[in-house]
Amino acid sequence: MEKFTKLTGVAVPFPMINIDTDKIIPSRWLKTIKRTGLGVGLFESVRYNDDGSEVPDFILNRPPYRDAKILVAGANFGCGSSREHAIWALLDFGIRCVIATEVADIFATNAAKNGILIVKLPQGEVDKLMADAELGENGRLAIDLEAGEISRPDGETIAFEIDPFVKHCLLNGLDDIALTLAKVDAIECFEDQQKASQPWLYA
């Protein structure tokens, strides 16, 4: 997966609470196992009219939020089902970071395994970033994962912490497959020993 080191961009203000994964990507999109092409379905039920045209006032249909890279969300974002398609839809749209007071555990786990940074902050800090996001192009945020800091447009920095292992994986672009391949020598050594001691397993 793509490494996450530093990210600067427009943030989307999305204050609604309890946004579940069905709201993020409707179930009809779950037929595909491809990770691309899902961005168009992001928040489909509120982003489009019944005839498929865009809802003009929906935040992602307005410049500069069409090119947003950060989502400042309400509490309990990503609750509901465990569908990984919700993460893929955010990534395909261009979102690389979600900031909120609370994020559903399974959603956060899926996010980390796909290269999306989840930042959990106290409500007061989220409120500041939400206000910045409402400024559009003038409220761009800068995130430095190594330093654990978010820089606001007024120059203030907000510190954050994440699990050290998740941080290591994001900084180095390591998903589950990459983590496994990092131990390929040990795996091959085990297989060689097993073939010698239990050859019938490989017959």
Image (cartoon, rainbow, N blue to C red):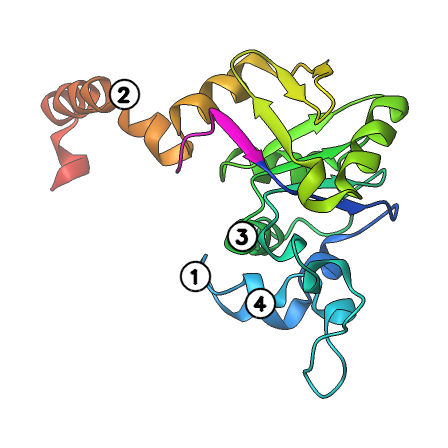
Span colored in magenta: 1-8
Q: Quadrant of the image for the C terminus? A: top left
Vertical position of residue 190 compared to residue 132: above or below: above
Q: Which residue is mark 4?
A: 40
Q: Are marks 1 and 4 in contact (CB under 8 Å)?
A: no
Q: Residue at x 54, y 22 (%)?
A: 166
Q: CA distance from mark 1 to mark 3?
A: 9 Å
Q: CA distance from mark 1 to mark 4?
A: 13 Å
Q: CA distance from mark 2 to mark 1?
A: 27 Å
Residue 129 figure quarter: top right
Labelled disc at residue 183: 2
Q: Quadrant of the image for the N terminus? A: top left
The first of marks 3 and 4 along the sequence is 4
Nearer to us: label 2 or label 4: 4
Q: Amino acid at mark 4?
A: Val
Q: Which residue is mark 3?
A: 88
Question: Is 91 colored magenta in this rendering?
Answer: no
Is the residue marked by circle 2 packed among few (<14), some (14-19), or many (20+) residues within 10 Å? few
Labelled disc at residue 34: 1
